[in-house]
Amino acid sequence: MGAYRMTVRRTILLLATTTGYQTRAFAERAERLGLEVVLATDRCKGLGDPWGDRSIPVQFHDPFAYIDKLEAAARERPFASIVAVGDRPTFLAALAAERLGLPYHPPAAVEACNNKYLARERYRAAGLLVPEYFRIALGEDPGRAASRAPFPCVLKPLGLSGSRGVIRADNQPEFVAAFERIKALLESREFVIQPNEGNRWVQVESFIPGREFAIEALVAEGRLQVLALFDKPDPLDGPFFEETIYVTPSRQSAAAQNELIETIRRGAEALGLRRGPLHAEVRLNQQGAWILEMAARPIGGLCARALRFDGEMPLEELILRHALGEDVSWARQMDPASGVMMIPIPRAGVYENVQGLEQAREVPGVFDVLITATPGQKLAPLPEGGSYLGFIFARENAPEQVEQALHQAHRRLEFQIAATLPVLTSTTSSQGERNPAEKPPPPQRSTAPSGGAGIPAPPECPGSDDTRS
């Protein structure tokens, strides 16, 4: 299957935040399939056409303003399908697909995926397990809101993903501190220049105990096709919820796996997802399965490299084929077990270098270690941060061996992170401390796979790639 090429050259509209890791991976696979790629991305409008590729500049925080532009582009080069990479491009992709009559998730379904409150409302209406929840505006009094919080609880921004801004609170003082921290993040320059209605609210939910899992799937005419069920073996109990290891296949019982998958199927139906990729986070305890998040996009960052299907087909190619209407129900993972570690940022500071990289790559089962941080880059861990130091990938005969290999490789890495000196700026407090919500520069591009249908790393507008899963 991997050598198969389309006999008729068709055009894919690829919507992505700048040109990150996944964008190049999709472009490379499209080129191998003989497809033409038209990229719509949030580059600076003032840059003109710096790549010479006739890409379409858009702003994902204002999607309705760019529908006509995409429709005009489609008249010039008709699109066979639409693919979106990352959370922010998905709503514009859904609007464009609806306007152009192309198969995709409906806009209302994508809107619910990108708004935690709307999603919870639909899950509850469908009879799914949902925690106690309510939302509060950034301008409200957090002390008053804390009086009705179901402790222990979790506070989270409505419109962010990848555990960013998610904080657990066990009492009223912790609630107020968490709220103020999230408010500072959402009022930072990164989000001021990219306004989003969801970022004006904080959702409060009762904490859901249990083990956490991730599901990668495709939806075709409303039917769910599960591609991978990942265990997250490291505990995620707070106060922050940084994901580290994904391992597939799951080690849960068949009954537990069926419950997880059936819950995601019902959740996708409740949201109204129809056609395209789906990435979901779910928890399982004695009460059953609880959906944490559901996104109308593939797994983020470089994590997709942990998956390959029959004929060594990567996830990106599978999604492209599915988007073009090809039947991919045959797809099965070709590795007995595989996984990825998203290398966490241990503390704020400035990245200098890493030692032990070759030793980590020599761990049995590890097939690659990629460091995506670049020297001089300011680092911010969760809950403010939006990236990782890099990724470790492993394949083995059993999930336990994969997990062991990932941990062993991580222990061989030693990162040098220098402390940042306090500088009085607009993002600095009156005490001279750096605002932890300040966004670090984008990850180093040169350490990740490059190329991709001739697409280099671009000059960028302020913003971020979707680097978390």
Image (cartoon, rainbow, N blue to C red):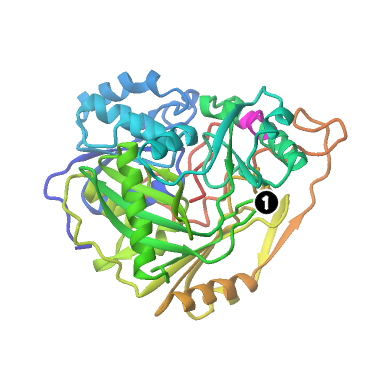
- Residue at x 66%, y 53% (from the top left corner): 375
Query: With respect to residue 361, does 424 lie above or below?
Result: above
In the image as oriented, which residue stretches furthest toward the left? 7
**Left or right: 166, with 111 as reference point:** right
Q: In which quarter of the image is residue 336?
A: bottom left
* Residue 56 place in picture, x, y as percent: 36, 29
Disc 1 designates what residue?
Answer: 239
Mark 1 is surrounded, within 10 Å at the Cα level, by few (under 14), some (14 to 19) or many (20 or more) other residues, namely some
Type of amino acid at the residue the image marks with label 1: Pro
Q: Magenta residues, as a range?
A: 184-190
Q: Main secondary structure of the magenta part?
A: helix
Q: Percent from the top left, x then y, of residue 274? A: 26, 40
The image quadrant of residue 184 is top right
Q: In which quarter of the image is the N terminus?
A: bottom left
Where 240 falls versus 56 (above or below)? below
Q: Compare residues 359 and 309 and report the one nearer the observer.
A: 309
Does residue 209 appear in this view? yes
Depth check: give the residue in front, 285 or 332.
Answer: 285
**Residue in front for this viewpoint, 62 or 218:** 218
Relative side of 254 to 206, left or right = left
Residue nearer the viewer, 293 or 16 = 293
> Where is residue 158 drawn, in percent x and y?
53, 34
Q: Is residue 55 magenta?
A: no
Give the residue at x 35% y 47%.
278
Reply yes or no: does residue 188 show up in magenta.
yes
Above-or-below relation of 433 to 211: above
